[in-house]
């Protein structure tokens, strides 16, 4: 895998993927997911049109069934079963995409990598732009993938639990980067999930995920570093990423790892857990 010197090593271009569709060992995953306000149905869009050979990773379905939170990570055995049924192996080269680009694909990029699929990348630009450029698509009933053997080994050190998040808020042992929009972060806007308190964790920095991309493409490494530092992050210190339900937090994780920051974890419960409780400290206003 070769990229331009100023480009993330974790993304691939349209040209790169277009020239490799159908190659043995290359797998493509549609990881699109949308908020209700976006009025888009990811599963229906995938069924209607997709990159040739792509499988659909349902981010609402492939979760821990024992959790009452929306996107809790599956356990190791369940994730292995999910990935295997999608025809994925941890040794494959896997390219993950979403509709607008740099929205929900990084979450599945992160999941696959923390479970051992080290050759996983995000498609730079998104499927909406891919279609507009007249690049290859496939319509009609998707072909069911041939099952594969995905040997999952979870790197649990990449995940922050609720108890660990409490400690981080209490001690300041890690920086907190919140990917939600400024209105939700400050508490000026209501949360999309009913009954959820508004605001942010004490000490958190707001890093709205859209500032890290442009036109569905991840910004070049110098621009990523500038955006992360402008948001108040010290790239020499640990960072835990968070958002509404643990999906767009992975955009910050992707950006951090792209600039060489590897001391980062993701708070999987995110605001759905923190803001949904009545015993957690919350502040409003600017960071």
Image (cartoon, rainbow, N blue to C red):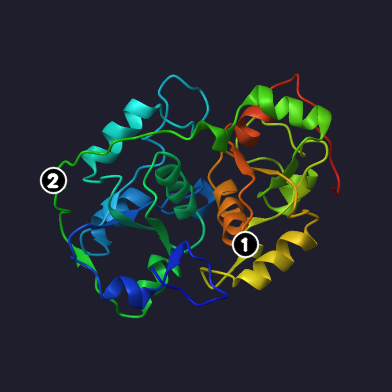
Using the image, tell me which numbered label, if any, was put on residue 54: none
- Residue 107 visible in this rendered orientation of the protein: yes
**Direction bottom: furthest residue:** 133
Q: In the image, which is nearer the foreground, mark 1 or mark 2?
A: 1
- Could you say where residue 70 lies in the image, as x and y percent from the top left? 50, 32
For image coordinates 51% across by 23% down, the residue present is 68
Say whether marks 1 and 2 touch (CB < 8 Å): no
Of callouts 1 and 2, which one flags the residue occurring earlier in the amino acid sequence?
A: 2
- Out of 253 and 66, give the one closest to the viewer: 253
SS at mark 1 in the image: loop
Per the image, the residue denoted by label 1 is 259
> Where does the N terminus fall, quadrant-wise?
bottom left
- 284 or 51, nearer to the observer: 51
Q: Position of residue 97 (x, y in %)?
A: 39, 59
Q: Is residue 237 left or right of residue 9?
A: right
Percent x, y of residue 221: 61, 69
Q: Quadrant of residue 281?
A: top right
Q: Residues within 10 Å of mark 2 (few under 14, many from 20)?
A: few
Q: Please say if 8 is above or below 104.
A: below
The foreground one among 210 and 222 is: 222
Q: Secondary structure at mark 2?
A: loop
Q: Residue at x 51, y 48 (%)?
A: 35
Q: Where's residue 259, x and y in %?
A: 62, 62
Q: What residue is at 66 percent from the left and 49 percent from the top? A: 180
| Horizontal arrangement in the rendering, residue 210 relative to residue 50 (left or right) | right
Can the viewer see residue 188?
Answer: no
Q: Residues within 10 Å of mark 1 (few under 14, many from 20)?
A: many
Residue shown at the point (74%, 37%) measured from the top left: 198
Q: Is residue 260 above or below residue 43?
A: below
Along the viewing direction, whichever of 188 and 108 lies nearer the viewer: 108
Q: Report the residue marked by disc 2.
A: 146
């Amino acid at each position: 895998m070769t990229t331009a010197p100023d480009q993330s090593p974790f993304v691939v271009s349209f040209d790169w993927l277009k020239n490799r569709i159908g190659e043995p060992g290359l797998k493509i995953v549609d990881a699109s997911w949308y908020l209700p306000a976006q009025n888009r149905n990811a599963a229906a869009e995938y069924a209607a049109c997709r990159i040739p050979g792509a499988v659909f990773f349902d981010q609402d379905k492939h979760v821990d069934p024992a959790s009452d939170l929306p996107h809790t990570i599956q356990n190791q055995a369940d994730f292995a079963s999910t990935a295997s049924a999608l025809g994925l192996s941890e040794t494959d080269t896997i390219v993950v995409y979403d509709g607008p680009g740099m929205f929900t694909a990084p979450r599945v990029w992160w999941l696959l990598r923390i479970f051992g699929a080290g050759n996983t990348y995000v498609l730079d630009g998104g499927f909406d732009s891919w279609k507009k450029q007249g690049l290859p698509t496939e319509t009609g009933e998707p072909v069911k993938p041939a099952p594969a053997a995905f040997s999952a080994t979870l790197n649990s050190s990449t995940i922050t639990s609720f108890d660990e998040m409490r400690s981080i808020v209490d001690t300041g042992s890690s920086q907190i980067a919140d990917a939600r929009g400024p209105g939700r972060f400050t508490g000026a806007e209501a949360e999309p999930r009913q009954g959820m308190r508004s605001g942010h964790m004490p000490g958190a920095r707001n890093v709205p995920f859209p500032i890290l991309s442009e036109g569905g493409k991840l910004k070049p490494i110098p621009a990523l570093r500038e955006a992360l530092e402008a948001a108040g992050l010290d790239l020499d210190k640990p960072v835990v990423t968070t958002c509404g339900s643990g999906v767009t937090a992975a955009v910050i994780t992707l950006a951090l790892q792209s600039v060489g920051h590897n001391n980062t974890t993701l708070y999987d419960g995110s605001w759905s857990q923190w803001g949904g409780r009545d015993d957690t400290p919350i502040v409003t206003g600017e960071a």
